[in-house]
Image (cartoon, rainbow, N blue to C red):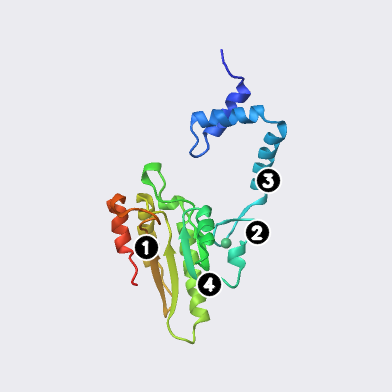
Amino acid sequence: MAVLPRSVEKVIEEFGKLPGVGPKSAARMAYFFLRAPRERSEGLAHALIAMKDQTKTCSVCFNVADMDPCAICSDRTRNRASICVVEEPLDVVALEQSGVYSGTYFVLGGVVSPADGIGPEQLRMRDLKSVVSERAQSVANSTRTDGPAELEIIIATNPSLEGEATSAYIHDMLDEIELPEGVTIRLSRLAVGLPTGADLEYADRQTLKRALEGRTTL
Ligand SMILES: [Zn+2]
């Protein structure tokens, strides 16, 4: 005999499928909604449906947006000769909040992860390739008269094993692109180092290694 009504079990099951939510938290959230007024549940349900109905994927950078192309891609003041490649839309939010980047983005939609069966073909590598080719062409066109032109690509995948593997893959893929004459690609990887407030002696070897490699000249 089931102890819980099936409808409650179902909600616990659904919450349990959310990232980072274990069975206990799932049950706690379900009970919260069970006890809360009906408006709470309606509010959540409506917000979720509205989010699905009212968001689009930008056809240029694949970021989540309320219009296509997104606000960043349609902003003519952004530097289109710079593309920052990130894993997920939330990474765009984080970088935008830093306020230091004025180029454009490309959202890969994940990272290469053989353990999870995610290869480069599951990500937007082909789209990235065509965006880079296209952008290289427009860089060539806009600077035809004043010498060499540069397209900057910043790989901003996470400093995880998967992020590194993805970065290496992008690097190889960019090598295959035939660039218009006079255009070069300046490729960089986001520096990874010590978080502010961290103690050197507690940093792991990998973090220290990357911090040293990414050191800046003063
Ligand atoms: Zn966009």
Residue toward you, 48 or 93: 93
Nearer the N terminus, badge 3 or badge 1?
3
Image point 37% across, 45% down: which residue?
Answer: 114
For the C terminus, the quadrant is bottom left
* Residue marked by disc 4: 79
Q: Residues within 10 Å of mark 1 (few under 14, many from 20)?
A: some
Nearer-N-terminus badge (2/4):
2
Q: Earlier in the sequence, mark 4 or mark 3?
A: 3
* Residue at x 67%, y 43% (from the top left corner): 47
- Secondary element under disc 1, as helix, strand or loop, is helix
* Up-down relation of residue 137 to residue 188 (above or below): below
Give coordinates of residue 198: x percent, y percent: 36, 53
Asked if disc 2 and disc 3 are in contact, CB closer than 8 Å, the reply is no
Q: Which mark is residue 67?
A: 2
- Would you name the residue on which mark 3 appears? 50
Query: Amino acid type of disc 4?
Result: Asn
Q: CA distance from mark 2 to mark 3?
A: 15 Å
Q: What secondary structure is marked by label 4? A: strand
Residue type beneath disc 3: Ala
Q: Which residue in the protein does label 1 denote?
A: 171
Q: Please state which of residues 95 and 110 is positioned toward the viewer in this rendering.
A: 95
Q: Are marks 3 and 1 in contact (CB under 8 Å)?
A: no
Between circles 2 and 4, the one closer to the viewer is 4
Q: How far apart in space, not on screen, are marks 2 and 4 (Cα)?
A: 20 Å
